[in-house]
Amino acid sequence: METSESQNKLHSRLRLWEFPDQYVIEPADGSGAPCLDISRVDASMKLIDQVSECKSLRVPKIHSISGVVGMLKLLAGSYLVVVTETERVGSFLGHPIFKITSLKVLPCDHSLKNSPEEQKKMETEFSKLLSVAEKTTGLYFSYEVNLTLSSQRLHDLGAESKSLPLWRQAEPRFLWNNYMLEVLIDNKLDQFLLPVIQGNILFITSIGKDIVDITLIARRCTRRNGTRMWRRGADPDGYVANFVETEQIVQMNGYSSSFVQVRGSMPFMWEQIVDLTYKPKFEIVQPEEATRIAERHFLDLRKKYGSVLAVDLVNKHGGEGRLSEKFASVMQHITGDEIRYLHFDFHRICGHVHFERLSILYEQIEGFLEQNGYFLVNEKGDKMKEQLGVVRTNCIDCLDRTNVTQSMIGRKMLELQLKRIGVFGAEETISSHLNFDERYKILWANHGDDVSIQYSGTPALKGDFVRYGHRTTQGVLKDGWSSLVRYYLNNFADGTKQDAIDLLQGHYIVAMSRDMAPVPQKGGLEAVANFPVALAVVLISFWFATMSLKQAGSDYKHKHLFFSLLWTGICVGVAALVRANGRIFCNRPRLHKPRG
Protein backbone atom coordinates (compact mmCIF):
# COMPACT_ATOMS: atom_id res chain seq x y z
CA MET A 1 0.00 0.00 0.00
CA GLU A 2 1.34 3.45 -0.93
CA THR A 3 2.13 5.82 1.94
CA SER A 4 0.83 9.39 1.97
CA GLU A 5 4.37 10.60 1.28
CA SER A 6 4.81 8.41 -1.79
CA GLN A 7 1.38 9.43 -3.10
CA ASN A 8 2.40 13.11 -2.90
CA LYS A 9 5.88 12.64 -4.36
CA LEU A 10 6.32 14.34 -7.73
CA HIS A 11 7.27 12.29 -10.77
CA SER A 12 10.84 13.28 -11.62
CA ARG A 13 11.03 11.50 -14.98
CA LEU A 14 8.25 11.48 -17.52
CA ARG A 15 7.68 10.21 -21.05
CA LEU A 16 5.35 12.11 -23.39
CA TRP A 17 3.45 10.14 -26.04
CA GLU A 18 1.95 12.31 -28.79
CA PHE A 19 -0.94 10.47 -30.49
CA PRO A 20 -3.12 12.11 -33.16
CA ASP A 21 -6.04 12.41 -30.74
CA GLN A 22 -4.41 12.41 -27.30
CA TYR A 23 -1.31 13.09 -25.23
CA VAL A 24 -0.24 10.48 -22.69
CA ILE A 25 2.25 11.39 -19.97
CA GLU A 26 3.83 8.25 -18.57
CA PRO A 27 5.88 8.19 -15.33
CA ALA A 28 9.33 6.84 -16.24
CA ASP A 29 10.78 6.80 -12.72
CA GLY A 30 10.00 3.14 -12.05
CA SER A 31 7.10 3.94 -9.74
CA GLY A 32 4.53 2.03 -11.80
CA ALA A 33 2.10 4.91 -11.19
CA PRO A 34 -0.84 5.57 -13.55
CA CYS A 35 -0.36 7.60 -16.75
CA LEU A 36 -2.06 10.91 -17.45
CA ASP A 37 -4.27 10.89 -20.56
CA ILE A 38 -5.16 14.29 -22.10
CA SER A 39 -7.58 14.60 -25.00
CA ARG A 40 -6.42 16.75 -27.92
CA VAL A 41 -10.07 17.44 -28.77
CA ASP A 42 -11.41 18.98 -25.57
CA ALA A 43 -8.39 18.80 -23.14
CA SER A 44 -10.25 16.47 -20.77
CA MET A 45 -7.96 14.55 -18.42
CA LYS A 46 -8.01 11.13 -16.80
CA LEU A 47 -5.61 8.62 -15.28
CA ILE A 48 -5.06 5.34 -17.13
CA ASP A 49 -3.14 2.25 -16.08
CA GLN A 50 -0.87 2.12 -19.12
CA VAL A 51 -0.23 3.54 -22.59
CA SER A 52 -2.64 2.07 -25.11
CA GLU A 53 -1.38 -0.20 -27.86
CA CYS A 54 0.13 1.61 -30.85
CA LYS A 55 -1.57 0.87 -34.18
CA SER A 56 -0.43 1.68 -37.70
CA LEU A 57 -2.74 4.71 -37.86
CA ARG A 58 -1.77 5.89 -34.38
CA VAL A 59 2.04 5.93 -34.41
CA PRO A 60 3.04 8.35 -31.64
CA LYS A 61 5.94 10.73 -31.25
CA ILE A 62 7.75 10.00 -27.98
CA HIS A 63 9.70 12.57 -25.94
CA SER A 64 11.26 12.74 -22.50
CA ILE A 65 9.99 15.65 -20.41
CA SER A 66 10.83 16.90 -16.93
CA GLY A 67 7.44 18.07 -15.76
CA VAL A 68 4.02 19.55 -16.44
CA VAL A 69 3.76 23.31 -15.91
CA GLY A 70 0.02 23.49 -16.47
CA MET A 71 -2.81 24.13 -18.91
CA LEU A 72 -4.13 27.33 -20.51
CA LYS A 73 -7.56 27.73 -22.11
CA LEU A 74 -8.08 30.23 -24.92
CA LEU A 75 -11.25 30.91 -26.95
CA ALA A 76 -11.79 27.39 -28.28
CA GLY A 77 -8.70 25.32 -27.61
CA SER A 78 -6.59 24.53 -24.58
CA TYR A 79 -2.79 24.38 -24.45
CA LEU A 80 -0.63 22.09 -22.34
CA VAL A 81 2.71 23.55 -21.16
CA VAL A 82 5.53 21.09 -20.38
CA VAL A 83 9.21 21.30 -19.42
CA THR A 84 11.38 19.80 -22.15
CA GLU A 85 14.91 20.76 -21.04
CA THR A 86 16.46 21.53 -17.65
CA GLU A 87 19.81 22.17 -16.04
CA ARG A 88 20.72 21.18 -12.48
CA VAL A 89 22.14 24.32 -10.85
CA GLY A 90 22.73 23.28 -7.24
CA SER A 91 20.81 22.42 -4.10
CA PHE A 92 18.56 24.16 -1.59
CA LEU A 93 18.75 22.75 1.95
CA GLY A 94 20.19 19.55 0.50
CA HIS A 95 17.60 19.10 -2.27
CA PRO A 96 18.45 19.32 -6.01
CA ILE A 97 17.39 22.50 -7.84
CA PHE A 98 16.74 22.68 -11.57
CA LYS A 99 16.57 25.60 -13.99
CA ILE A 100 14.11 25.34 -16.88
CA THR A 101 15.95 25.96 -20.16
CA SER A 102 13.13 25.01 -22.54
CA LEU A 103 9.33 24.98 -22.42
CA LYS A 104 6.97 23.58 -25.04
CA VAL A 105 3.31 24.43 -25.64
CA LEU A 106 1.20 21.51 -26.88
CA PRO A 107 -2.18 22.40 -28.46
CA CYS A 108 -5.39 20.59 -27.56
CA ASP A 109 -7.39 22.47 -30.15
CA HIS A 110 -9.02 19.93 -32.46
CA SER A 111 -12.40 21.36 -31.49
CA LEU A 112 -11.31 24.58 -33.21
CA LYS A 113 -12.10 22.94 -36.57
CA ASN A 114 -15.80 23.40 -35.89
CA SER A 115 -15.48 26.99 -34.66
CA PRO A 116 -16.59 30.07 -36.64
CA GLU A 117 -13.97 31.59 -38.93
CA GLU A 118 -13.74 34.75 -36.85
CA GLN A 119 -13.10 32.75 -33.72
CA LYS A 120 -10.32 30.83 -35.48
CA LYS A 121 -8.63 34.12 -36.36
CA MET A 122 -8.85 35.30 -32.77
CA GLU A 123 -7.51 31.97 -31.51
CA THR A 124 -4.53 32.25 -33.86
CA GLU A 125 -3.83 35.75 -32.59
CA PHE A 126 -3.83 34.58 -28.99
CA SER A 127 -1.86 31.41 -29.62
CA LYS A 128 0.97 33.60 -30.93
CA LEU A 129 1.35 34.96 -27.42
CA LEU A 130 2.17 31.44 -26.24
CA SER A 131 5.33 31.47 -28.35
CA VAL A 132 6.38 34.50 -26.29
CA ALA A 133 5.54 32.54 -23.14
CA GLU A 134 7.82 29.70 -24.23
CA LYS A 135 10.76 32.11 -23.99
CA THR A 136 10.13 33.04 -20.34
CA THR A 137 13.43 33.24 -18.46
CA GLY A 138 14.45 32.63 -14.86
CA LEU A 139 12.24 29.62 -14.06
CA TYR A 140 13.32 27.14 -11.35
CA PHE A 141 11.83 24.12 -9.60
CA SER A 142 12.57 21.22 -7.28
CA TYR A 143 10.91 17.83 -7.09
CA GLU A 144 11.58 17.62 -3.34
CA VAL A 145 11.46 21.02 -1.62
CA ASN A 146 9.19 24.07 -1.66
CA LEU A 147 11.15 26.89 -3.32
CA THR A 148 8.43 29.50 -2.74
CA LEU A 149 9.18 29.71 1.00
CA SER A 150 12.24 31.15 2.71
CA SER A 151 14.35 28.94 4.99
CA GLN A 152 12.73 30.45 8.08
CA ARG A 153 9.18 29.90 6.84
CA LEU A 154 10.04 26.34 5.76
CA HIS A 155 11.48 25.61 9.20
CA ASP A 156 8.33 26.94 10.87
CA LEU A 157 5.98 24.74 8.82
CA GLY A 158 4.17 22.17 10.95
CA ALA A 159 4.54 18.43 10.35
CA GLU A 160 1.06 18.28 8.80
CA SER A 161 1.87 21.04 6.30
CA LYS A 162 5.16 19.39 5.36
CA SER A 163 3.32 16.17 4.49
CA LEU A 164 1.13 17.98 1.92
CA PRO A 165 1.93 18.01 -1.82
CA LEU A 166 4.42 20.74 -2.73
CA TRP A 167 1.81 22.85 -4.55
CA ARG A 168 -0.34 22.99 -1.41
CA GLN A 169 2.63 24.13 0.70
CA ALA A 170 3.50 26.86 -1.79
CA GLU A 171 3.24 30.59 -1.18
CA PRO A 172 0.81 31.67 -3.96
CA ARG A 173 2.56 35.02 -4.45
CA PHE A 174 5.71 33.31 -5.70
CA LEU A 175 4.16 30.35 -7.53
CA TRP A 176 4.76 31.37 -11.15
CA ASN A 177 2.41 28.74 -12.63
CA ASN A 178 -0.29 29.11 -9.98
CA TYR A 179 -3.03 29.86 -12.54
CA MET A 180 -1.91 27.23 -15.05
CA LEU A 181 -2.04 24.51 -12.40
CA GLU A 182 -5.74 25.05 -11.64
CA VAL A 183 -7.01 22.50 -14.18
CA LEU A 184 -4.62 19.83 -12.85
CA ILE A 185 -5.61 20.66 -9.28
CA ASP A 186 -9.28 20.25 -10.17
CA ASN A 187 -8.46 16.80 -11.54
CA LYS A 188 -6.53 15.85 -8.35
CA LEU A 189 -3.26 15.16 -10.19
CA ASP A 190 -0.89 15.94 -7.30
CA GLN A 191 2.00 13.84 -8.59
CA PHE A 192 2.04 15.78 -11.86
CA LEU A 193 1.74 19.28 -10.29
CA LEU A 194 5.18 20.90 -10.63
CA PRO A 195 5.51 24.19 -8.66
CA VAL A 196 7.74 26.71 -10.48
CA ILE A 197 9.18 30.02 -9.31
CA GLN A 198 10.55 32.89 -11.39
CA GLY A 199 13.67 34.73 -10.28
CA ASN A 200 17.09 33.18 -9.89
CA ILE A 201 19.08 30.80 -7.69
CA LEU A 202 22.86 31.28 -7.62
CA PHE A 203 25.62 29.57 -5.66
CA ILE A 204 29.25 30.04 -4.59
CA THR A 205 31.39 27.92 -2.26
CA SER A 206 34.46 28.19 0.01
CA ILE A 207 36.35 30.72 2.12
CA GLY A 208 39.97 29.75 2.74
CA LYS A 209 40.25 26.61 4.84
CA ASP A 210 36.53 26.65 5.74
CA ILE A 211 34.00 25.25 3.24
CA VAL A 212 31.11 27.70 3.20
CA ASP A 213 28.19 27.57 0.78
CA ILE A 214 26.45 30.82 -0.15
CA THR A 215 23.10 30.71 -1.97
CA LEU A 216 21.24 33.73 -3.34
CA ILE A 217 17.57 33.24 -4.25
CA ALA A 218 15.22 35.72 -5.93
CA ARG A 219 11.48 35.02 -5.82
CA ARG A 220 9.39 37.21 -8.14
CA CYS A 221 5.83 37.95 -7.05
CA THR A 222 3.14 37.14 -9.63
CA ARG A 223 0.41 39.46 -8.29
CA ARG A 224 1.48 42.46 -10.40
CA ASN A 225 3.98 40.78 -12.67
CA GLY A 226 5.03 42.43 -15.89
CA THR A 227 7.45 44.58 -17.85
CA ARG A 228 9.13 47.83 -16.92
CA MET A 229 6.86 50.55 -18.38
CA TRP A 230 3.71 48.43 -18.48
CA ARG A 231 3.66 47.61 -14.76
CA ARG A 232 4.36 50.47 -12.37
CA GLY A 233 3.26 51.29 -8.85
CA ALA A 234 0.52 49.35 -7.06
CA ASP A 235 -2.90 47.98 -7.88
CA PRO A 236 -5.95 48.82 -5.72
CA ASP A 237 -5.20 45.82 -3.47
CA GLY A 238 -1.71 47.03 -2.61
CA TYR A 239 0.28 44.57 -4.75
CA VAL A 240 3.23 46.35 -6.34
CA ALA A 241 5.16 45.94 -9.57
CA ASN A 242 8.55 44.23 -9.62
CA PHE A 243 8.16 42.85 -6.09
CA VAL A 244 11.04 40.47 -5.49
CA GLU A 245 12.04 38.64 -2.30
CA THR A 246 15.80 38.05 -2.09
CA GLU A 247 17.16 35.45 0.34
CA GLN A 248 20.85 35.04 1.13
CA ILE A 249 21.66 31.65 2.69
CA VAL A 250 24.93 30.62 4.40
CA GLN A 251 25.65 26.96 5.20
CA MET A 252 28.68 25.51 7.02
CA ASN A 253 29.30 22.50 9.28
CA GLY A 254 25.57 21.82 9.63
CA TYR A 255 24.74 25.43 10.49
CA SER A 256 22.35 27.26 8.19
CA SER A 257 21.59 30.98 8.27
CA SER A 258 19.45 33.12 5.99
CA PHE A 259 18.72 36.81 5.55
CA VAL A 260 15.74 38.14 3.55
CA GLN A 261 15.18 41.56 2.00
CA VAL A 262 12.58 42.74 -0.52
CA ARG A 263 12.19 45.27 -3.31
CA GLY A 264 9.07 46.68 -4.95
CA SER A 265 7.63 49.71 -6.71
CA MET A 266 6.32 52.65 -4.67
CA PRO A 267 3.04 51.36 -3.19
CA PHE A 268 0.44 53.68 -4.65
CA MET A 269 -1.07 53.97 -8.13
CA TRP A 270 1.24 55.70 -10.61
CA GLU A 271 2.25 55.09 -14.19
CA GLN A 272 4.37 56.07 -17.18
CA ILE A 273 2.59 55.87 -20.53
CA VAL A 274 5.08 55.04 -23.30
CA ASP A 275 4.94 57.78 -25.93
CA LEU A 276 8.29 57.56 -27.78
CA THR A 277 9.95 60.01 -25.38
CA TYR A 278 13.06 58.69 -23.65
CA LYS A 279 11.59 59.18 -20.17
CA PRO A 280 7.78 59.39 -20.21
CA LYS A 281 6.10 61.63 -17.68
CA PHE A 282 5.23 60.18 -14.26
CA GLU A 283 1.52 60.32 -13.49
CA ILE A 284 -0.02 59.68 -10.07
CA VAL A 285 -3.38 57.93 -10.51
CA GLN A 286 -6.23 58.39 -8.01
CA PRO A 287 -4.03 60.23 -5.47
CA GLU A 288 -6.88 60.23 -2.95
CA GLU A 289 -6.53 56.42 -2.74
CA ALA A 290 -2.76 56.45 -2.15
CA THR A 291 -2.83 56.17 1.65
CA ARG A 292 -5.37 53.33 1.68
CA ILE A 293 -3.41 51.34 -0.92
CA ALA A 294 -0.09 51.86 0.85
CA GLU A 295 -1.65 50.81 4.16
CA ARG A 296 -2.82 47.54 2.58
CA HIS A 297 0.64 46.95 1.15
CA PHE A 298 2.48 47.50 4.42
CA LEU A 299 -0.09 45.53 6.42
CA ASP A 300 0.63 42.57 4.15
CA LEU A 301 4.39 43.02 4.62
CA ARG A 302 3.94 43.22 8.41
CA LYS A 303 2.04 39.93 8.45
CA LYS A 304 4.66 38.15 6.37
CA TYR A 305 7.94 39.66 7.54
CA GLY A 306 7.44 41.49 10.85
CA SER A 307 8.85 45.02 11.19
CA VAL A 308 9.43 46.93 7.96
CA LEU A 309 11.97 49.61 7.08
CA ALA A 310 11.12 51.24 3.72
CA VAL A 311 14.22 52.74 2.06
CA ASP A 312 13.31 55.11 -0.79
CA LEU A 313 16.22 55.84 -3.16
CA VAL A 314 14.55 58.13 -5.72
CA ASN A 315 15.53 61.73 -6.52
CA LYS A 316 14.10 64.59 -4.47
CA HIS A 317 13.65 66.81 -7.52
CA GLY A 318 12.13 66.61 -10.99
CA GLY A 319 9.57 64.01 -12.00
CA GLU A 320 10.90 61.50 -9.49
CA GLY A 321 10.61 64.15 -6.80
CA ARG A 322 6.82 64.28 -7.21
CA LEU A 323 6.62 60.55 -6.59
CA SER A 324 9.01 60.71 -3.65
CA GLU A 325 7.03 63.57 -2.12
CA LYS A 326 3.81 61.56 -2.44
CA PHE A 327 5.45 58.47 -0.93
CA ALA A 328 6.77 60.47 2.04
CA SER A 329 3.36 62.12 2.53
CA VAL A 330 1.58 58.77 2.51
CA MET A 331 4.07 57.22 4.95
CA GLN A 332 3.37 59.94 7.52
CA HIS A 333 0.00 58.23 8.10
CA ILE A 334 1.49 54.73 8.30
CA THR A 335 4.82 54.86 10.11
CA GLY A 336 5.09 53.77 13.72
CA ASP A 337 7.13 51.39 15.86
CA GLU A 338 6.81 48.55 13.35
CA ILE A 339 6.87 50.47 10.06
CA ARG A 340 9.55 53.04 9.31
CA TYR A 341 10.38 55.17 6.27
CA LEU A 342 13.76 56.55 5.21
CA HIS A 343 14.53 58.61 2.12
CA PHE A 344 18.05 58.47 0.69
CA ASP A 345 18.62 60.50 -2.49
CA PHE A 346 20.96 58.02 -4.18
CA HIS A 347 21.90 60.17 -7.17
CA ARG A 348 22.53 63.34 -5.16
CA ILE A 349 24.68 61.61 -2.53
CA CYS A 350 26.42 58.95 -4.64
CA GLY A 351 26.29 60.57 -8.06
CA HIS A 352 27.15 58.16 -10.87
CA VAL A 353 30.48 56.91 -9.52
CA HIS A 354 30.77 57.37 -5.74
CA PHE A 355 28.72 54.39 -4.60
CA GLU A 356 31.01 53.88 -1.61
CA ARG A 357 28.98 56.70 -0.05
CA LEU A 358 26.28 54.11 0.59
CA SER A 359 28.08 53.76 3.91
CA ILE A 360 26.12 56.87 4.90
CA LEU A 361 22.90 54.92 4.34
CA TYR A 362 24.20 51.89 6.23
CA GLU A 363 24.92 54.04 9.29
CA GLN A 364 21.25 55.06 9.28
CA ILE A 365 19.84 51.52 8.99
CA GLU A 366 22.46 49.57 10.94
CA GLY A 367 20.41 49.66 14.13
CA PHE A 368 17.34 48.22 12.42
CA LEU A 369 19.38 45.42 10.82
CA GLU A 370 21.05 44.43 14.08
CA GLN A 371 17.76 44.58 15.99
CA ASN A 372 15.84 42.41 13.51
CA GLY A 373 18.70 40.08 12.69
CA TYR A 374 18.67 36.95 10.54
CA PHE A 375 17.55 33.32 10.74
CA LEU A 376 19.97 30.71 12.14
CA VAL A 377 19.67 26.98 12.92
CA ASN A 378 22.38 24.68 14.33
CA GLU A 379 23.47 21.25 13.12
CA LYS A 380 20.56 19.65 15.03
CA GLY A 381 18.02 21.85 13.24
CA ASP A 382 17.26 23.89 16.39
CA LYS A 383 16.40 27.54 15.80
CA MET A 384 19.01 29.81 17.40
CA LYS A 385 17.93 33.13 15.89
CA GLU A 386 15.05 34.37 13.76
CA GLN A 387 14.66 37.35 11.47
CA LEU A 388 12.09 39.72 12.93
CA GLY A 389 11.86 42.36 10.21
CA VAL A 390 12.72 43.25 6.63
CA VAL A 391 14.26 46.12 4.67
CA ARG A 392 12.10 47.11 1.69
CA THR A 393 14.11 49.00 -0.94
CA ASN A 394 12.81 50.91 -3.95
CA CYS A 395 13.95 53.27 -6.67
CA ILE A 396 11.91 53.97 -9.82
CA ASP A 397 12.45 50.61 -11.54
CA CYS A 398 13.62 48.80 -8.38
CA LEU A 399 16.54 47.52 -10.46
CA ASP A 400 19.77 49.49 -10.67
CA ARG A 401 20.03 51.70 -7.59
CA THR A 402 18.11 49.05 -5.66
CA ASN A 403 20.49 46.25 -6.56
CA VAL A 404 23.58 48.28 -5.62
CA THR A 405 21.96 49.05 -2.26
CA GLN A 406 20.75 45.52 -1.59
CA SER A 407 24.19 44.10 -2.41
CA MET A 408 25.70 46.45 0.20
CA ILE A 409 23.15 45.36 2.81
CA GLY A 410 23.67 41.70 1.91
CA ARG A 411 27.45 42.06 2.30
CA LYS A 412 27.15 43.65 5.74
CA MET A 413 24.70 40.98 6.93
CA LEU A 414 26.85 38.15 5.52
CA GLU A 415 29.78 39.40 7.59
CA LEU A 416 27.58 39.31 10.71
CA GLN A 417 26.40 35.79 9.82
CA LEU A 418 29.95 34.52 9.27
CA LYS A 419 31.13 36.03 12.56
CA ARG A 420 28.23 34.38 14.40
CA ILE A 421 28.96 30.97 12.88
CA GLY A 422 32.66 31.33 13.72
CA VAL A 423 34.12 31.66 10.23
CA PHE A 424 35.20 35.30 10.70
CA GLY A 425 36.97 36.94 13.60
CA ALA A 426 35.62 40.10 15.23
CA GLU A 427 37.46 42.48 12.86
CA GLU A 428 37.46 40.25 9.77
CA THR A 429 35.60 41.32 6.61
CA ILE A 430 34.78 39.86 3.21
CA SER A 431 37.30 42.26 1.65
CA SER A 432 40.15 40.50 3.49
CA HIS A 433 39.48 37.34 1.41
CA LEU A 434 40.24 38.54 -2.12
CA ASN A 435 39.11 35.44 -4.01
CA PHE A 436 35.86 35.15 -2.08
CA ASP A 437 35.28 38.90 -2.30
CA GLU A 438 35.53 38.77 -6.10
CA ARG A 439 33.17 35.80 -6.37
CA TYR A 440 30.67 37.37 -3.96
CA LYS A 441 30.55 40.57 -6.02
CA ILE A 442 29.94 38.54 -9.19
CA LEU A 443 27.18 36.61 -7.39
CA TRP A 444 25.28 39.81 -6.63
CA ALA A 445 25.98 41.31 -10.06
CA ASN A 446 24.53 38.22 -11.77
CA HIS A 447 21.58 38.35 -9.38
CA GLY A 448 20.88 41.96 -10.35
CA ASP A 449 21.24 41.21 -14.06
CA ASP A 450 18.76 38.33 -13.92
CA VAL A 451 16.14 40.32 -12.01
CA SER A 452 16.61 43.24 -14.41
CA ILE A 453 16.36 41.13 -17.58
CA GLN A 454 13.02 39.71 -16.43
CA TYR A 455 11.55 43.19 -15.83
CA SER A 456 13.33 45.48 -18.30
CA GLY A 457 14.83 43.12 -20.90
CA THR A 458 18.44 44.22 -20.23
CA PRO A 459 21.08 43.59 -17.54
CA ALA A 460 21.13 45.97 -14.57
CA LEU A 461 22.71 49.40 -14.92
CA LYS A 462 25.56 50.26 -12.53
CA GLY A 463 26.35 46.53 -12.46
CA ASP A 464 30.09 47.21 -12.84
CA PHE A 465 30.18 48.67 -9.32
CA VAL A 466 28.53 45.56 -7.88
CA ARG A 467 30.80 43.32 -9.96
CA TYR A 468 34.14 45.10 -9.45
CA GLY A 469 33.62 47.45 -6.51
CA HIS A 470 34.04 50.60 -8.65
CA ARG A 471 32.69 52.19 -11.82
CA THR A 472 34.47 51.48 -15.12
CA THR A 473 34.47 53.14 -18.55
CA GLN A 474 33.26 49.91 -20.10
CA GLY A 475 30.45 49.77 -17.52
CA VAL A 476 29.33 53.31 -18.34
CA LEU A 477 29.28 52.53 -22.08
CA LYS A 478 27.40 49.30 -21.43
CA ASP A 479 24.82 51.25 -19.40
CA GLY A 480 24.34 53.60 -22.36
CA TRP A 481 23.65 50.70 -24.71
CA SER A 482 21.32 49.01 -22.22
CA SER A 483 19.38 52.27 -21.86
CA LEU A 484 18.94 52.41 -25.64
CA VAL A 485 17.75 48.80 -25.76
CA ARG A 486 15.31 49.49 -22.91
CA TYR A 487 13.91 52.40 -24.90
CA TYR A 488 13.19 50.13 -27.86
CA LEU A 489 11.73 47.32 -25.77
CA ASN A 490 9.51 49.68 -23.74
CA ASN A 491 7.95 51.14 -26.87
CA PHE A 492 7.83 48.27 -29.33
CA ALA A 493 8.15 44.86 -27.71
CA ASP A 494 7.06 44.91 -24.08
CA GLY A 495 3.37 45.47 -24.88
CA THR A 496 3.12 42.06 -26.52
CA LYS A 497 5.24 40.51 -23.77
CA GLN A 498 2.91 42.03 -21.19
CA ASP A 499 -0.08 40.43 -22.93
CA ALA A 500 1.68 37.05 -22.75
CA ILE A 501 2.45 37.51 -19.05
CA ASP A 502 -1.15 38.50 -18.30
CA LEU A 503 -2.35 35.41 -20.15
CA LEU A 504 -0.02 33.05 -18.27
CA GLN A 505 -0.75 34.55 -14.86
CA GLY A 506 -4.52 34.55 -15.32
CA HIS A 507 -4.73 38.33 -14.90
CA TYR A 508 -6.93 38.31 -17.99
CA ILE A 509 -9.23 35.57 -19.17
CA VAL A 510 -9.78 35.17 -22.90
CA ALA A 511 -13.36 35.77 -24.00
CA MET A 512 -15.15 36.54 -27.25
CA SER A 513 -17.38 39.60 -27.31
CA ARG A 514 -19.71 40.93 -29.98
CA ASP A 515 -17.75 44.13 -30.49
CA MET A 516 -14.51 42.35 -31.35
CA ALA A 517 -12.85 43.79 -34.44
CA PRO A 518 -11.21 41.42 -36.90
CA VAL A 519 -7.50 40.87 -36.44
CA PRO A 520 -5.78 43.45 -38.67
CA GLN A 521 -3.70 42.01 -41.49
CA LYS A 522 -0.19 43.35 -41.82
CA GLY A 523 0.79 44.82 -45.13
CA GLY A 524 3.20 47.30 -46.67
CA LEU A 525 5.64 48.62 -44.11
CA GLU A 526 4.12 46.52 -41.34
CA ALA A 527 5.01 43.31 -43.16
CA VAL A 528 8.74 44.07 -43.18
CA ALA A 529 9.24 46.19 -40.07
CA ASN A 530 11.21 44.41 -37.39
CA PHE A 531 13.94 44.94 -34.84
CA PRO A 532 16.92 44.18 -37.16
CA VAL A 533 15.70 46.84 -39.62
CA ALA A 534 15.31 49.41 -36.85
CA LEU A 535 18.67 48.45 -35.34
CA ALA A 536 20.41 48.85 -38.70
CA VAL A 537 18.95 52.33 -39.11
CA VAL A 538 20.00 53.26 -35.58
CA LEU A 539 23.57 52.02 -36.13
CA ILE A 540 23.82 53.93 -39.45
CA SER A 541 22.64 57.06 -37.64
CA PHE A 542 25.38 56.49 -35.04
CA TRP A 543 27.99 56.26 -37.82
CA PHE A 544 26.88 59.48 -39.55
CA ALA A 545 26.63 61.24 -36.20
CA THR A 546 30.16 60.15 -35.26
CA MET A 547 31.51 61.48 -38.54
CA SER A 548 29.73 64.75 -37.83
CA LEU A 549 31.31 64.93 -34.37
CA LYS A 550 34.80 64.42 -35.79
CA GLN A 551 34.23 67.43 -38.02
CA ALA A 552 32.77 69.50 -35.23
CA GLY A 553 35.73 70.36 -33.04
CA SER A 554 34.51 72.59 -30.26
CA ASP A 555 31.84 74.29 -32.30
CA TYR A 556 28.59 74.21 -30.33
CA LYS A 557 26.46 74.20 -33.48
CA HIS A 558 28.13 71.08 -34.76
CA LYS A 559 27.63 69.35 -31.43
CA HIS A 560 23.99 70.28 -31.64
CA LEU A 561 23.91 68.82 -35.15
CA PHE A 562 25.48 65.61 -33.84
CA PHE A 563 22.77 65.01 -31.29
CA SER A 564 20.07 66.04 -33.73
CA LEU A 565 21.28 63.50 -36.27
CA LEU A 566 21.57 60.84 -33.59
CA TRP A 567 18.03 61.17 -32.30
CA THR A 568 16.60 61.74 -35.78
CA GLY A 569 18.14 58.43 -36.84
CA ILE A 570 16.68 56.67 -33.84
CA CYS A 571 13.26 58.13 -34.51
CA VAL A 572 13.40 57.02 -38.15
CA GLY A 573 14.29 53.51 -37.01
CA VAL A 574 11.55 53.23 -34.48
CA ALA A 575 8.99 54.85 -36.78
CA ALA A 576 9.25 51.75 -38.98
CA LEU A 577 7.90 49.79 -36.04
CA VAL A 578 5.17 52.06 -34.75
CA ARG A 579 2.30 50.32 -36.53
CA ALA A 580 3.75 46.82 -36.47
CA ASN A 581 5.02 45.90 -33.02
CA GLY A 582 3.83 48.13 -30.18
CA ARG A 583 0.64 47.25 -28.38
CA ILE A 584 -0.03 50.91 -27.66
CA PHE A 585 0.44 51.94 -31.31
CA CYS A 586 -1.23 49.03 -33.06
CA ASN A 587 -4.97 48.89 -32.39
CA ARG A 588 -4.69 45.17 -31.88
CA PRO A 589 -7.94 44.06 -30.24
CA ARG A 590 -7.73 43.36 -26.54
CA LEU A 591 -9.50 40.04 -26.37
CA HIS A 592 -9.20 39.48 -22.66
CA LYS A 593 -11.35 40.46 -19.80
CA PRO A 594 -10.12 40.80 -16.20
CA ARG A 595 -10.21 37.65 -14.16
CA GLY A 596 -12.77 37.85 -11.45
Image: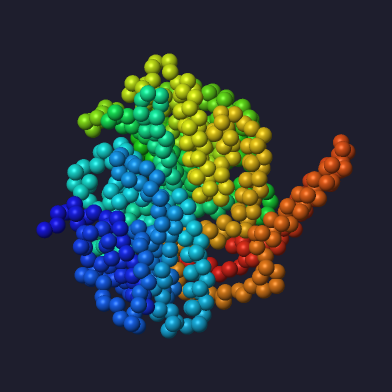
Q: Is 318 left, or right, of 144 in this rendering? A: right
**Is residue 361 in view?**
yes
User: Residue at the location (57% across, 74% down)?
Assistant: 519
Q: Is 101 left, or right, of 581 in this rendering? A: left
Q: Nearer the viewer, residue 241 or 112?
A: 112
**Residue 380 locus on image (x, y percent):** 21, 31
Q: Nearer the viewer, residue 447 or 16?
A: 16
User: Residue at the location (32% across, 29% down)?
Assistant: 252
Q: Is 7 left, or right, of 355 in this rendering? A: left
Give the answer, above or below, for where 393 lies relative to 87: above
Q: Nearer the viewer, residue 547 or 417?
A: 547
Give the answer, above or below, for where 523 lies relative to 176: below
Q: Nearer the viewer, residue 523 or 579?
A: 523
**Residue 121 locus on image (x, y percent):** 52, 77
Residue at the far left in the pictured view: 1
Q: Where, by quadrant of the figure, is residue 30 drawn?
A: bottom left
Type of colouring: rainbow
**Residue 216 locus on image (x, y percent):** 41, 38
User: Residue at the location (50% across, 35% down)?
Assistant: 442
Name the quarter where the N terminus is drawn: bottom left
Q: Tell me how many marks there are.
A: 0
Residue at the far front in the pictured view: 56
Q: Where, by quadrant of the figure, is residue 387 drawn?
A: top left
**Residue 54 locus on image (x, y percent):** 29, 77
User: Residue at the location (58% across, 35% down)?
Assistant: 464
**Is residue 329 in view?**
no
